[in-house]
Image: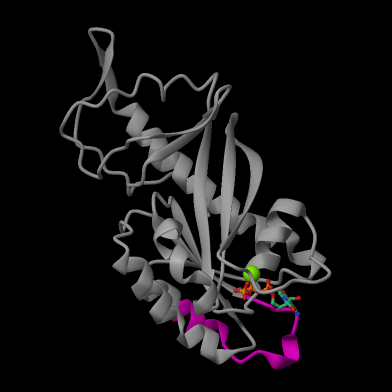
Amino acid sequence: MANESFENEGGTGSRNSRNTNFTSSVDLSTSLDSSVQTRIFKIIVIGDSNVGKTCLTFRFTGGSFPDKTEATIGVDFREKAVEIEGEKIKVQVWDTAGQERFRKSMVEHYYRNVHAVVFVYDVTKMASFQNLKTWIQECNGHRVSPTVPRVLVGNKCDLVSHIQVPSNTALKFADAHNMLLFETSAKDPKESQNVDSIFMCLACRLKAQKSLLYRDVEREDGRVRLSQETDVNKSNCHC
Ligand SMILES: Nc1nc2c(ncn2[C@@H]2O[C@H](COP(=O)(O)OP(=O)(O)OP(=O)(O)O)[C@@H](O)[C@H]2O)c(=O)[nH]1
Ligand SMILES: [Mg+2]
């Protein structure tokens, strides 16, 4: 599991976190003080160049489709504050470059302490779907834990007459890789809720995972102690 990040009155910080198996005691006292801290969930968006990663992240954080985009160089950060079950959470979206020459030096940073991964392909371009295997390999190669939630997004569904990737093919692939599939369009305003649900679904799952961590702590002598092995795979997310 990645480090947990927080933002409080003093700014953004990072907390050393926990592995998926918890048998040792960890001081979590600060993390339980939710009144002064906003948790930050880092979500990276990965996929071939031109599939619409920038437009999808723009749609989620800004609520519109950009008039014009240029190839992303390195990474662009976009943030959105959301509220889930009464808790304010900052969703920090890392919009990565699809072009190899613009991403080389940044790849390590993308995957470091990532909380969730969004893989994007273009439904009108079969090659972008076939290349997903390479993107998944890269992700696994950077030791991203299997407990880090991943979703698959087929973008540009508004181009109905140009679709090359059938839904059932994409669904099989998503199932085989234990991912949810979203087919959507960053361009079509009617799809904006669907775009939001990609990120909100991940945020809900992350919150549920981390709630389980907190549930299994007990206070001992004024300190917080993890009391038992905790399974962070379980989630209350219904999406
Ligand atoms: N029709 C349609 N076009 C889209 C959609 N999303 C993005 N585009 C267009 O696709 C092109 C590429 O979009 P970007 O969001 O810049 O692609 P990217 O994946 O960020 O590309 P890199 O930054 O190079 O990795 C742009 O011309 C967008 O206007 C969509 O949902 N429908
Ligand atoms: Mg881009």
Residue at the image position 69 percent from the left and 56 percent from the top = 60
All told, the count of numbered labels is: 0
**Foreground pick, 166 / 133:** 133
Displayed-image quarter of ligand 1: bottom right
Q: Which residue sits furthest top?
A: 221
**In the displayed structure image, the side of residue 44 where residue 145 appears, left or right:** left
Residue 28 shows in this picture: yes
Q: Which residue sits furthest right?
A: 67
**In the displayed structure image, the side of residue 157 where residue 229 appears, left or right:** left
Q: Which quarter of the figure has residue 138?
A: bottom left
- Where is residue 128 drawn, in percent x and y? 54, 85
- Where is residue 157 drawn, in percent x and y? 69, 79
- Where is residue 16 drawn, in percent x and y? 33, 35
Q: Work out whether 182 lies above or below 19.
A: below
Q: Give the range drawn in magenta.
A: 155-172
Residue at the image position 62 percent from the left and 56 percent from the top = 197
**Foreground pick, 187 / 69:** 69
Q: Work out whether 12 lies above or below 204.
A: above
Residue 177 shows in this picture: no
Q: Work out whether 148 lies above or below 30.
A: below
The color scheme shown is one colour
Reply yes or no: does residue 99 show up in magenta.
no
Q: Which quarter of the figure has residue 221?
A: top left
- Where is residue 175 drawn, in percent x and y? 40, 73
Residue at the image position 25 percent from the left and 43 percent from the top = 19
Q: Work out whether 84 lies above or below 139.
A: above
